Amino acid sequence: MTDIRIFDTTLRDGEQSPGASLNHAEKLEIARQLEALGVDVIEAGFPITSQGDFDAVSAIAHELTKPIVCGLARCVPRDIDRAGEAVKHAKQGRIHVFCATSKIHREHKLKKAFEQIIELSQHSVEQARGYVEDVEFSPEDGSRTELNYLVDITAAVIEAGATTINIPDTVGYSVPEEYGHIFAYVREQLPIIDEKGIYLSSHCHNDLGLAVANSLSAMQNGARQIECTINGIGERAGNAALEEIVMAMRTRADYYEKYNTNIDISKLYPTSRMVSTLTGLQVQRNKALVGQNAFAHESGIHQDGMLKNRNTYEIMDPQTIGVPESKLVLGKHSGRHALGDRIKQLGYTIDDDTLNRVYETFKALADKKKDVFDEDIEAMIDTTLENAAPLWELVSFQVNSGSGVAPSATVTMRDSSGEEREDTETGDGPLDAIFSAVQKLTGVKVKLEDYNTRAVTGGKDAQGEATVQVNHHGRKVRGRGVSTDVIEAAANAYVAAINRIKTAEARKVAATTMGEDDPDVKAESP
Ligand SMILES: CC(=O)SCCNC(=O)CCNC(=O)[C@H](O)C(C)(C)COP(=O)(O)OP(=O)(O)OC[C@H]1O[C@@H](n2cnc3c(N)ncnc32)[C@H](O)[C@@H]1OP(=O)(O)O
Ligand SMILES: CC(C)C(=O)C(=O)O
Ligand SMILES: [Mg+2]
């Protein structure tokens, strides 16, 4: 049997999905769930990106005990220093250094000759080895790099101390036979890989819908680590989906008989739900394994087959991946124990204080709504984590709008010192009026770029989830809110976005007062 390392990059490449940024509490919650899922490596972030990313990688490295915790770095000394600092408390820490090697990236992006790239990569790997023994190197855009160059850079970084070589299909251009051949070729040219027990790794993007197929092909040609994300989230069309890779190997164990992973498949579905809820990235209905329709049967002939023998139309038992058999129904008579137990089953490990805050919201919701479903609970946890330490809170609002009336809103908000303030504004519509009042009260001016709503659960008393994206001095910031009242959900989402901006500003002030360079403002260039 060959053990395949599952390297999860949901918190790094996954978080690079437009609109998916996560706050500190949300990242920790996902990291804990990934540990419970059994992933071998967690790429927790790219520490040079911002103080927030650094803090999250550092907190995850402090807390998690089982997986290797990894931070990404360019071949830039300051990137490597930050990554080294961030993972230094990990039980097993890794620095992942990357440098693009393809002709197009060499000439147009890095503006460096291949020889310079080799030298830079070697120095960077050596620098990273000064922090940790476990160093991964990725020749970015590896699948579009000349094969002899790939071999040369692989040999050079192994000599410098790299222990894992990841060959990414950065732009999702490769096809399975070709991508597999790259691994077979590099291994054949460099026997040192097998002799020294160097891990080869795949990292595939889904621009042509081939990320999972390419990953499996790499595995069959010698990759012993697969990089992937929950729900396949990631840059552009996303990364290879963890759940699809693992279940392809499990369901077709007859075909992939030599390979094994440490993943606890019963946690796949709850993990998918958590990542979707906390990132706000909805899973498409027909997504393999975790989409709403993945195990639904609509047509008569299929239903007939299912009733006679479910294997006629189902190749997996949904319960083995943690799809719940029936929806839990909690109501206003339920107590903290029942709620806490259900939250645990959903994969969250919240503390008592958070449970108490969720319980308060739960009771308020149960008063308005007959049944409280899993999705409602997930939405409540999401809102609580999103507002882990809210700077501003929406206390109440009233809107006045209708035909022939200029829409206006009166909003009351409370700041972190507990002081309440009220303001009335007019706008193009009720939401515009509320948003103007929130801007006035908080003193943060932003431009609304995107606004979406959807029902979290079914029925006429369904909860509505609102997401907004605002632009603050060129930086896009997202916020989410949930309520049975869609206007209140939108107002909460807007306040959540403002709180994110305020939190980032407070961090910048703290970093500047401490005399540190603020990586949010400008990172060092190579
Ligand atoms: C394939 C991937 O997924 S790679 C990871 C992509 N993820 C991200 O970029 C998210 C986080 N990124 C960021 O926050 C910022 O881009 C930072 C902090 C890393 C850098 O910000 P800035 O210093 O302002 O640079 P900016 O992003 O505009 O440009 C990138 C610079 O890094 C250089 N660069 C890119 N990759 C590498 C590398 N692997 N090694 C060394 N330099 C690199 C580029 O050539 C460019 O340099 P230049 O300024 O000399 O032209
Ligand atoms: C940083 C590298 C591995 C990456 O994400 C890519 O090339 O897609
Ligand atoms: Mg990538």
Image: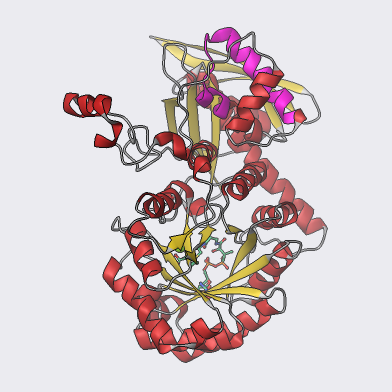
Q: Nearer the viewer, residue 193 or 439?
A: 193
Color encoding of the figure: secondary structure
> Would you say residue 104 is visible in this rendering?
no
Q: How many marks can you see?
A: 0
Q: Is residue 375 one of those drawn in magenta?
A: yes
Quadrant of residue 491 within the rendered picture: top right
Outermost residue to the left: 301
Residue visible at 62% across and 64% down in the picture:
71
Q: Is residue 166 left or right of residue 342?
A: left
Give the x, y percent position of residue 326.
46, 22
Range of magenta residues? 353-379
- Percent across and percent down for residue 85 are 73, 66
Rendering quarter of residue 257: bottom left
Identified at 53% across, 10% down, the residue is 369
Type of secondary structure dominating the magenta stretch: helix
**Residue 380's image quarter?**
top right
Residue 426, given in percent of the width and then of the height, sits at 52, 20
- Say if residue 227 shows up in the picture: yes
Who's the residue at 73% across and 50% down the image?
Answer: 507
Query: Residue at position x 53%, y 85% from top?
Result: 195
Q: Position of residue 110 (x, y in %)?
A: 46, 78
53 w.r.t. 164: above or below: above
Give the residue at the far bottom of this rendering: 115
Q: Nearer the viewer, residue 33 or 139?
A: 33
Q: Is residue 147 magenta?
A: no
Image quarter where the C terminus lies is: bottom right
